[in-house]
Amino acid sequence: MHWFFASWHWWLVHSGTSELTPNVWYNAWSGWVSDLGEVTLVGAVVVGYRHANCHIQGCWRLAKHEYEMDGVKYRLCRRHHPKVDTRPTLQDFDAHHAAMVAKPKRATRSGLGPKGVTDARGGQSRA
Ligand SMILES: [Zn+2]
């Protein structure tokens, strides 16, 4: 039983709760107990990372793309998303912009689209 009291005394001294100190809990509150608040900060970072990373098991990348499967939405990284495999290049944006500029504007619902463009009902616009 001596080993238990020796261990208990060691714990009381090193945890700062020994009865031999003038204020029993002072060393604990100003010591290791005050560090528990920092553990919550580390926990918040871990929870934030786990919320933002890819839903594929074992993948560490940040997930930026949604994917819906059987009514459940998942967030996947670029590598694991089935439709997002590469990043668009500047040439892709230039080609898309050139195609959109060359494309005639759509007719409005009121039929007042650009000249020569038919509206949604198939009639000629009046502009
Ligand atoms: Zn992934």
Image (tube, grey):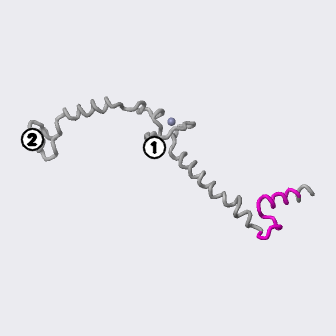
> Can you say which quadrant of the picture contains the N terminus?
bottom right
Q: Residue at x 12, y 37 (%)?
A: 117
Out of 95 and 38, give the one closest to the viewer.
38
**In this rendering, would 82 be left or right of 89?**
right
Q: Residue at x 28, y 31 (%)?
A: 94
Q: Secondary structure at mark 2?
A: loop
Marker disc for residue 6: none
Give the residue number, with chain letter if any, for mark 2: 125
Q: Give residue 102's position: percent from left, percent from top.
A: 19, 32
Magenta run includes residue 50: no
Q: Is residue 12 above or below residue 106?
A: below
**Amino acid type of the residue tagged 2 in the rendering:** Ser
Q: Residue 27 in the image: x percent, y percent?
A: 74, 64
Assign the C terminus to one quadrant of the image. top left
Image location (x, y in percent) of residue 2? 92, 57
Q: Residue at x 9, y 41 (%)?
A: 125
Q: Residue furthest right?
A: 2
Label 1, ligand 1: CB separation under 8 Å: no
In the image, taking residue 37 as reference, residue 25 lies left or right, namely right
Q: Earlier in the sequence, mark 2 or mark 1?
A: 1
Q: Mark 2 CB in 8 Å range of ligand 1?
A: no
Q: On the image, numbered disc 1 is attached to which residue?
A: 73
Q: Decide: is 26 above or below 50.
A: below
Residue visible at 70% across and 64% down in the picture: 29
Q: Which residues are magenta?
A: 6-23
Please, is residue 30 above or below residue 122 in the view? below
The amino acid on which the numbered mark 1 sits, given as a three-letter code, is Lys
CA distance for labels 2 and 1:
43 Å
| Residue 19: percent from left, percent from top | 82, 67
- 104 left or right, relative to 23: left
Considering depth in this image, is 115 or 40 the residue closer to the camera? 40
